[in-house]
Image (cartoon, rainbow, N blue to C red):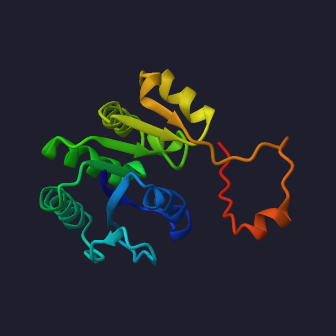
Amino acid sequence: MKRILIIAKSSNEVLYSKIEPLALSKETDVIYLIRDEYYPNKNEKIFQVENLKYKNKIIKFVSKLIRGVLLIKKFKLNLILSVHLVPHGYLGFLISKLTSIPHIHLINAGPREIWSDGKLLKNFNLFVLKNAVKIIVQGSNTNAYLCSQGIKKENIKIINNVIEKKINLNIKAIEERNIILYLYVD
């Protein structure tokens, strides 16, 4: 059974689209969520660690790092999932190194999540990603970019959030089944 620590910065809607399928999986036992904002949770498998309201970014980062390590040790968590590289991918990387628990990173903002803060951080971001056991991307452009930057193709998993133009959407059927659509263009 998977016992997951998730460190994330996303809107509630985006986070819901990532966490809820994990929580609904029979393979997931429990999810502990470290996040600054309140997550309106209705799933009994998801526990949010109290909201961190520190104004100082360094204190907030160190607090999340300590909480992550303590949660893994206390609840015997066996997987780390981070969403958004700065700072949550860094936290996932460090917690993984301190606990020897595998770290998976989900790139939500495409390649710009890696290079937008300049060349020095781009190189560090690639180092962090190369140390993840798996990187989840949302399209072939991000996949190609990561491969061009030296990340092994077998460490990347594409989970599309895109609806191809060829698909004929039956909106009435979608509404009847209460299906949530999450669209992202990569």
Q: Position of residue 160 (x, y in %)?
A: 62, 43
Is residue 169 positioned above or below 52 on the image?
A: above
Residue 48 drawn at (x, y percent): 32, 72
Q: Residue at x 39, y 51 (%)?
A: 27
Residue 53, above or below 145:
below
Q: Is residue 105 left or right of residue 164?
A: left
Q: Residue at x 26, y 44 (%)?
A: 93
Residue 168 x %, y %: 87, 49
Residue nearest the observer in this picture, 180 or 116: 180
Residue at 84% x, 54% y is 169
User: Above or below — where is 59 with respect to 89?
Assistant: below
Q: Where is residue 39 shown, x and y percent of the image?
A: 43, 74
The front one of 38 and 167 is 167
Write the residue at 52% across / 40% down.
137
Say which quadrant the C terminus sits in: top right
How many dots with numbers?
Answer: 0
Taking 99 as reference, is 87 left or right?
A: right
Q: Choose between 100 and 176: the one closer to the eye.
A: 176
Is residue 98 shown left or right of residue 165?
left
